[in-house]
Amino acid sequence: AAAQSGEKAQRVEAIQALAGRNAKSSVPPLLKLAIDPEAAVRAAAIKALGILAVAKDLHSLVDLLIHAQSDRDSLEGALAQAAWRVPDKDAATAPVLAALAGTTPENQAALLRVAAQIPGTTTLTALRAGLKDADPGVQNAALRGLAEWPDAAPIADLAALLRSPSGETHR
């Protein structure tokens, strides 16, 4: 309750206390606070969501990211942090990758950046598809994800891109 009303500093402190106490039951109110008009409250809520959110909360975090007017980098980080803790990486990235269809190129790039931090077979497939996207921002997010991949799986994709780069950035 203290996180939802009162002075900004007290609200931030209450949010930090929830995260420090691993209060996973506080995720629903934190999702609302992640769109609070006060920037410091939003930042604290997003950071806490990265710590507290579990698999069932990933859809809500994806929705927050897609509709965010600000704090997109922080939301990407919180979503990746929460998804990383899910043992089944393909299940963790399922809501992220499902949101790719029908959203803006800016959101697609953000979702690919998140997915790239949770390596799995479905992520690799999505990054490969992103290389062929018409939008340069999506292509760049996919390329960076493949370039930072933790094993050699995308080597052939990267070698093909080196042989025939699709744009000035990829040269």
Image (cartoon, rainbow, N blue to C red):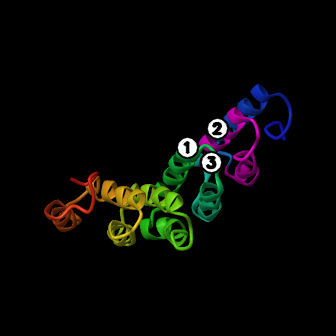
Q: Nearer the viewer, mark 2 or mark 3?
A: 2
For residue 49, the mark is 3
Q: In the image, is residue 122 above or below residue 28?
A: below
Q: CA separation, marks 2 and 3?
A: 10 Å
Q: Give the residue displayed 59% in from the left and 58% down from the top.
A: 54
**Residue of label 1:** 74
Kind of element beneath mark 3: helix
Kind of element beneath mark 2: helix
Q: How many labels sit on residues?
A: 3
Quadrant in which residue 39 is drawn: top right
Q: Give the residue displayed 49% in from the left and 56% down from the top.
A: 110
**Residue of label 2:** 43
Q: In the visual, does 126 lie left or right of 36?
A: left
Residue 103, given in percent of the width and then of the height, sits at 56, 67
**Residue type indicated by callout 3:** Leu
Please state the extent of the stretch shown in magenta in the rendering.
24-49
Residue 58, given in percent of the width and then of the height, sits at 59, 61
Q: In the image, is residue 166 above or below residue 43?
A: below
Q: Residues within 10 Å of mark 1 (few under 14, many from 20)?
A: some
Comes first in the chain, label 3 or label 1? 3
Q: Residues within 10 Å of mark 3 (few under 14, many from 20)?
A: many
Q: Main secondary structure of the magenta part?
A: helix
Q: Residues within 10 Å of mark 2 (few under 14, many from 20)?
A: many
| CB-based contact (under 8 Å), mark 2 and mark 1 | yes
Q: CA separation, marks 3 and 1?
A: 10 Å
Comes first in the chain, label 2 or label 1? 2
Judge by depth and name the residue closer to the eye, 42 or 106. 106
Kind of element beneath mark 1: helix
Q: In the visual, does 76 lie left or right of 11?
A: left
Q: In the visual, does 97 lie left or right of 155?
A: right
Quadrant in which residue 140 is drawn: bottom left
